Image: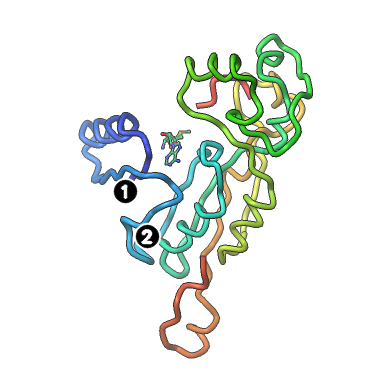
Amino acid sequence: MTVFDASPRQLAQDDMVAHRDGLALTTREGPMHDLSCFPDGRFDLVFHPTSNCYAPEVEPVWRECFRVLRPGGALLAGFMNPDVYIFDDGAQERGSLVVRHPLPYADVIDLPTEELQRLLERTHLMEFSHSLETQIGGQLKAGFLLTHLFEDRDCGPPGTGRSRYMPPHIARGRETQRLEPLSRSKAGGSASSPGYPCGTPC
Ligand SMILES: C[S@@+](CC[C@H](N)C(=O)[O-])C[C@H]1O[C@@H](n2cnc3c(N)ncnc32)[C@H](O)[C@@H]1O
């Protein structure tokens, strides 16, 4: 099993837990849109927990997931419901939902400088909303077949914040299968790949 993350601190924690619990785990550091340290078809399963809200673009991430999976491999992925980004975070912390931002939203683009500065003092991770077109459509475009999808309301205390009105996470338990390229199964020969902590209660 390999854990891939951009944060050396997260990976050090994963190493510590693996060592403590006797788990066979390899850690690799890098950005999720560039898995070039892994060869094509390296994995049977990619588990992508909700984290692409920290990447400016998601389509390169799905293409890389597809590339590193073997044909018939599976992707389990979770991501934010993009609609949660229309709300004002400050108002939400005070218990109100106030519509503020048009989509697509990005902390670094849409927040005024002072507000961005305050956010940077709390976390170094900047968030980006991603449309369903780039999340679900992006996976299909990369070559995946969608087999399961669910909407997750289980985020923060029940009935609080945005989860009272909408599922903040989508497809946490989704499985998306990488299909065998058609040309490979038909011709029997080899074919190239067909291309391809949130602090606020949700
Ligand atoms: C919600 S946490 C998930 C942590 C852990 N892997 C887990 O499954 O519980 C999101 C992780 O995404 C990582 N991350 C954020 N931006 C990233 C990027 N561009 N490339 C790779 N990892 C990134 C963060 O360092 C953080 O560890």
| Rendered-image quadrant of the C terminus | top right
The image's colouring method is: rainbow
Q: Residue at 29% x, 45% y: name it.
A: 28
Residue 68 picture location, percent across and down = 40, 61
* Front-lying residue, 23 or 140: 140
Q: Earlier in the sequence, mark 2 or mark 1?
A: 1
> Three-letter amino acid code at disc 2?
Phe
Residue 43's disc number: 2
Residue farthest along the bottom direction in this orientation: 187
Badge 1 marks a residue whose secondary structure is: strand
Q: What is the tally of numbered marks visible in this picture?
A: 2
User: Is 41 situated above or below 128?
Assistant: below
**Given the current orientation, which residue lies at the most extreme top position?**
94
Residue at the (56%, 49%) spot, across then down? 58
Q: Find disc 1 in the rendering and name its residue.
A: 2
Q: CA distance from mark 2 to mark 1?
A: 9 Å
Could you say which is closer to the camera, residue 102 or residue 132? 102
Q: Amino acid at mark 1?
A: Thr
In the image: residue 32, left or right of residue 62: left
Q: Are marks 2 and 1 in contact (CB under 8 Å)?
A: yes
The quarter holding residue 163 reads top right
Helix, strand or loop status at disc 2: strand
Q: Position of residue 53 (x, y in %)?
A: 56, 37
Q: 147 or 64: which is nearer to us?
A: 64
Q: Which mark is residue 34?
A: none
